[in-house]
Amino acid sequence: MERAVRSPRVRLGRRLLAGVAAALLLPAAAQAARWTVSPSVGASLIWSDNVELAPPGAEESDLVGELAPGIVAEADGRRLDLRLAWQGRVRVSSEDSDRNEVIHRAEARAAAELAPRTFFLDAEASVDQALVSARARGGVDSIFDGNRTDVVRYALAPRLERDWGPVAGRLVLRHEAADFERGAADTRADTVTARLGSGRRPSPLTWSVDYLDSNLDREGGDDSESRVLEGNADWRVGRSLHLLARAGREDHELATSRSLENGTFWSAGFAWTPGRRFSLRALAGENDREVALRIAPTPRTSLDLAWRDRDVGLNPAGAWDATLTQRSRRSTLRLHYGEEVTSVQRLVLAGRQAFVLVDPATGAPVLDPVTGLPVVLFADVFSLADGEFLRERGDLSWDLRGARTTLRLGAFGERRTFELGGEVERARGLTVAVERRLGARTRGALRASRVRNEFDDGREDDTTTGELSIGRESARRLGVSAAYRHQRRDSTEAGEDYRENRVTVTVTRRF
């Protein structure tokens, strides 16, 4: 069914302002903050021997001009933290004016304290590109391509918090939206989370009651609702031993072809922490079982392993979560595996649909020093779709830092099993990057990646990308860079292979 065309590009300014306006309109908070504004502009010439990623024999070359203005604004204050990054790309083809286009990428986040230690406001908004179909040729990093779409998201979340000593409370009302130009249904989500529990006053008995009410409304699609009430109690009976109890109820409504059980649960158990290097947590009862283990043989190495089997709710078969971290003076390793029931819309709303480069030490996205936007690690992965699915994902990130050279390694494997229909999508990828400081102001980089997509009908696609680049920035913040990129896809389906060679020369000025 065709929906009315509402271009996210037209809504860009409106959505970004809707996300941060409340914080910016606080004169006391905004004026007390320390502001930093960093505009930039870039100009590029791009040559490609297969600009539309056509199959062998149908390639067309093109010389493309690109203008890329951008700005990064940050405010850091006692009551306001704000960050806004935007970059536009205006591309003009020398061969076909129908290929001309304008692309936006932007991200804004704001956190304001409206009343001291009581009332807070969090806001965020973004606009980016997303892959429409993993089966079609091209992706979000193609020069000109019809296989990508604009995605705009925003969220506004007022929050009340209060700690009275023996008792503390928290209430969050979150409204968020994700708009897709095509490929998936526009979505609105409203979530209420509330907590009442022990406060900051020390006590051998701590407790909490948590409530979640989440509604996701897809325009023209299936909606979903979740309501969870859970209470927890922790009684310290010794230096290393705690007795635990948990009870609650889960109710979920979503389109699924499997049996979805709603109902109550309870469990009891213990937590044992004989020292800083080891802890064990175990609970068992009616419809609820959990085991969590933490091993930290050194201050820089830790393993967290958890398994939960709840017979009611979204993961009745049990769910695993594991994280291994290891840090040294020059390297950081992070390995993670997790399982969850989610959807494309919920991943987009949480900012987790694109696979970006992550700092293993902090878990935060690595930002481009010029644009201030997250560096995309894997551009072509999964298709946009409606409906919930079971997401099973493992990923690894590792970096090794030398005096002049940095080595980065990233890998992932993911399987998505859709609740309605049972379709399965799989993807796995590996990326390697070597960055070398060649001089005081000169850097070179070599990057390579490979992604495999597997589909239910037996089709398999392997996409391989390699890039060599060199850049230099002068003392006046004028940068010049050149890059050569080769990309190819090999598919088991006839007519879906392609090859591309691309050369890019860029001049960037930061102010």
Image (cartoon, grey):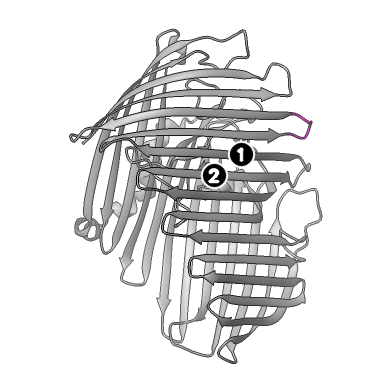
Q: Is residue 361 above or below residue 14?
A: below
Q: Which residue is at a point 54% across and 18% down the rendered structure image?
A: 500
Of callouts 1 and 2, the N-terminal one: 2
Q: Which residue is at a point 53% across and 14% down the rendered structure image?
A: 50
Structural crowding at the residue carrying mark 1, measured as other residues with C-alpha within 10 Å and reported as few (<14), some (14–19) or many (≥20) = many
Q: Position of residue 410 (x, y in %)?
A: 54, 44
Query: Which amino acid, by three-letter code, is at mark 1?
Result: Gly
Where residue 429 is drawn, which disc sits there?
Answer: 1
Structural distance between the alpha carbons of marks 1 and 2: 8 Å
Give, as a single range, the part of the protein colored magenta: 455-459
The foreground one among 208 and 85 is 85
Residue 380 visible to an observer of this rendering? no
Structural crowding at the residue carrying mark 2, measured as other residues with C-alpha within 10 Å and reported as few (<14), some (14–19) or many (≥20) = many
Which image quadrant: the N terminus?
A: top right
Q: Quadrant of residue 435?
A: top left
Q: What secondary structure predominates along the stretch shown in magenta?
A: loop
Q: Is residue 208 above or below residue 322?
A: below
Query: Which amino acid, by three-letter code, is at mark 2?
Result: Gly
Instruction: Confirm whether the magenta stretch covers residue 101.
Output: no
Q: Are marks 1 and 2 in contact (CB under 8 Å)?
A: yes
